[in-house]
Image (spheres, grey):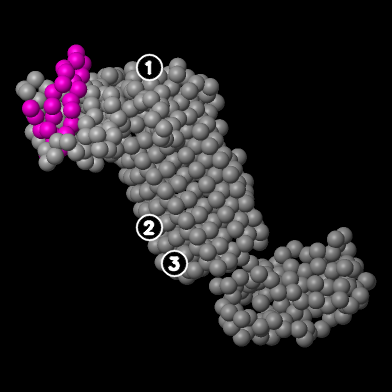
Amino acid sequence: MGEVGDQFLDETTIPTTSIQVDIRPVEDPDVATPYTHFFVGDTYQLDLIGQFTGNKRVVSITTSFTPGVGEYTVDFDKTSYTSDPMKGVVVAVQKLLDQFDELKSPPADLGGPTLQDHTHPKESMTSILVSHPDARDEVIRMSDFECDGVADHLEIQEAIDELTADGGTVWLSEGVFDIGATLTFPGGPTNPGIILRGMGWNTVLRITNSADIDAITFNEQNDIFLADFKIDGNRANQTAQGTGVDATEGAGQDSIGSRIERLWITEMDADGILIGSTTSQFIVRACRIDNCDNAGIRFFGSKNQIIGNNVIDCGTEGIFGDDDAGNGNVIADNIVDGCGSEGIITVMHGTTIVGNTSRNNLDGIVSAGTGGTATDNVIVGNVATDNSRYGIKLGNGVDGDSASNVVVGNLVTGNGTEAIRYGHTTGAKESIIQHNMGDTGGGTGPGTSPARSVEFSDQRAILVTGTGNQKWVAPIDVTIVDVQLAVGTSPTGADLVVDVNKNGTTIFTTQANRPTVPDGDADGVGAAASPDVTTMTPGEYLSVDIDQIGSTIAGGFLTVVIEWRPT
């Protein structure tokens, strides 16, 4: 006779692989209670006549329990999962064993949801467990491959290779695995997906001293899923660059529909994650990436999602969309802090950058082409604060521009130079930038809002020289950018020249630089003229004089446009 909790177990038979027991309450053996519920797959701890001791798993329930009848039969597996059972205690086998057991032998349909309803599709296929010597005894007993803590990449790679044809899951136990060669996912883009999954950040892939390797690479493989482990690049003991996860291998660099989730990648000698140029529908979510020499996450391609990651103290960019041809990518809800260059940067088109926090970097958020123009990017609802230079920057002012962007509702305070910066005038003219909260910092750049304009007009068919009567009063501190004019009738015999005055005094100290429509100009449009005096304070005003109209035919139908932006 033995006990389970406050229940008695009556031995009935002892089959070869199981034992059947009759369950009755202690208080009243003839009355059943709700406490006496057993389920297939559950594990209980028993002590039965000295020969059936330990944690036992329910194999089957041969007779359904009927309230009021008072008994039912439970079939237990004789295999003991522990060697020192505690009498009188009901315990479940660790969650790992339950989950892994179901994956290795999926249960029959019991009328409820199956694993395929809420996990990656491949998790219902073949599963292989790779154990570390520091793992728990029960995990090691169940493992398909046992590592010894030295050159553990050999066993892990063999497990991956076994799934190349049909796909499935390689589970890694807890422990620090020694990785002396790159783990690869070979095959082509039509092969089924493979999952490499750990037991959380206590599963560690640590690069061997002086290995100088990437930790994991894809070889044109689709539907790869990496989750729940840590990669330690051990960069203090490396001499050449290595990336945590490099999805650029193979001639086409294709990887469609792959996912990286809940990885911690640290101390890499190059990038944390690198995604190739023809990649699409790639998801990087909920990862921590820190202390990498280069970028935290650098990606190419289109329709990728970089969501909810923490990128901290990387040497160059935090998150870098590095593909002039890329479009339709999403960078959302990430935290980037303490990176040596841009926190978040895109050189792409149609990128949605929303809900991120980028602080303590060189620049917070940047949209700038590399030799071209990054266009149609949406930068909304971000926090870009306490960066060394700019909170948000459009265009880089050297060889790349950014245009047709929407920059709305961002918090851009405490940045060292400016809140929002434009590298080129194109970005300022063609972007919508509204309702951002910030300060200008200590800089003297072109400002925190796009250029605006004020227009003066004289629509007489034949112009005459004279002092202008129209005035425009500055509502705030402003910087005058340039002055441009056009006429409906071009002058002949001499140029048409105007002058712009602030409070009655010319802003073109060098009179040769005054705005001009050349004699006989075919289209009647003068080149933009940059003034010598550019600053105005609230209450100061501008006016326009016509100094010269042409000596043979006077110009007519004059329009003067003065561009300015808030200081």
Q: Is residue 100 visible?
A: no
Query: Residue beneath label 2, please?
Result: 360
Q: Position of residue 139 (x, y in %)?
A: 22, 26
| Tag shown at residue 413 | 3
The image shows a total of numbered marks equal to 3
Query: Against 402, is 494 above or below?
Result: below
Q: Residues within 10 Å of mark 3 (few under 14, many from 20)?
A: many
Is 544 left, or right, of 265 in this rendering? right
Provide the secondary structure element on which disc 2 rests: loop
Depth check, mark 1 against mark 3: the one in front is 1
Provide the secondary structure element on which disc 3 rests: loop
| Mark closest to the chain's N terminus, 2 or 3 | 2
Provide the secondary structure element on which disc 1 rests: helix
Is 273 left, or right, of 147 in this rendering? right
Three-letter amino acid code at the position of disc 3: Thr
Depth check, mark 2 against mark 1: the one in front is 1
Q: Position of residue 387 (x, y in %)?
A: 41, 59
Compute the Cα span from label 1 to label 3: 53 Å
Compute the Cα span from label 2 to label 3: 12 Å
Three-letter amino acid code at the position of disc 1: Glu
Task: Look at the image and tell me in which quarter the C terminus lies.
Answer: bottom right
Query: Residue beneath label 1, please?
Result: 162
Q: Residues within 10 Å of mark 2 (few under 14, many from 20)?
A: many
Q: Position of residue 124 (x, y in %)?
A: 41, 27
Give the quarter of the image for residue 427. bottom right
Compute the Cα span from label 2 to label 1: 45 Å
Magenta extent: 1-25
Q: Main secondary structure of the magenta part?
A: strand
Q: Do the residues under discs 1 and 3 have CB atoms within 8 angstroms?
A: no
Query: Against 494, is 75 above or below?
Result: above
Q: Do the residues under discs 2 and 1 have CB atoms within 8 angstroms?
A: no
Task: Look at the image and tell me in which quarter the N terminus lies.
Answer: top left
